[in-house]
Amino acid sequence: MMDDVDRIMAVMAAAFDPHYGEAWSRRQIEDALTLGNCHYLLIDAAEGPAGFALSRTGFEEEELLLLAVRPEFRGRGLGRSLLDHLEQAARKRGARRILLEMRRGNPAERLYSTFGFLKIGERKDYYRLSDGSRVDAITFAAALSPATPAG
């Protein structure tokens, strides 16, 4: 039976194009999860793991480190579902906004913009691709309304 890190790695292997070098190693995932301020969400389908999100909590902020959906499950709302669950969890942890950084041209930008992420910065030639070329990083933020107490 797969543990959660195995499930994350299975999604990552299927979802990330090696040309962009965006996938993390198993060690990077395990190290992040031992820090105590990193959190993950997993979505499973009958065929196995379908998607995940990995985030890090900071003072009044949640940083989305990775979000992936296996190609065969894209277009079914799983990415949006992961973002909705992340938003709820981040609010409970006291976050007032979610940050993320991604390479220019990443097709996930469309999902993030529909969720309310706005561009707040960019780093010229930040990412190096497998062919040696470079691409800009873009930083986005989405404001969160404060959590309302239950009751």
Image (cartoon, rainbow, N blue to C red):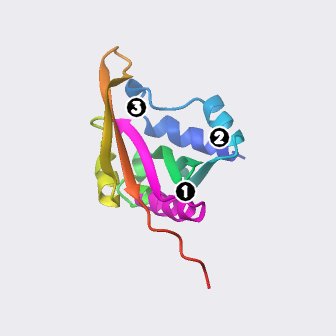
Question: Marks 2 and 3: CB-CB under 8 Å?
Answer: no
Out of 108 and 11, give the one closest to the viewer. 108
Q: CA distance from mark 2 to mark 1?
A: 13 Å
88 horizontally vs 20: left or right = right
The residue indicated by pointer 3 is 17
**Residue 107 drawn above or below residue 84:** above
Magenta residue span: 80-103
139 horizontally vs 86: left or right = left
Find numbered disc 1 in the image and state the secondary structure of the residue it sits on. Answer: strand
Residue 131 lies, in percent from the top left, at 34, 15
Give the amino acid type for the residue marked by disc 3 in the picture: Asp
Q: Residue at x 52, y 51 (%)?
A: 62
- Neighbour tally class for label 3: few under 14, some 14-19, many 20 plus, Cα within 10 Å: few
Residue furthest front as drawn: 59
**Residue 127 drawn above or below residue 121:** above
The residue indicated by pointer 2 is 6
Give the amino acid type for the residue marked by disc 2 in the picture: Asp
Tell me which label, 2 or 1, sits earlier in the chain.
Answer: 2
Res. 51 in view = no
Position of the C terminus, as image quadrant, is bottom right
Give the amino acid type for the residue marked by disc 1 in the picture: Ile
Query: What mark, if any, has residue 4 been given in the picture?
Result: none
Find numbered disc 3 in the image and state the secondary structure of the residue it sits on. Answer: loop
The residue indicated by pointer 1 is 43
Res. 78 in view = yes
Q: CA distance from mark 3 to mark 1?
A: 20 Å
Tell me which label, 3 or 1, sits earlier in the chain.
Answer: 3
Q: Residue at x 47, y 38 (%)?
A: 14
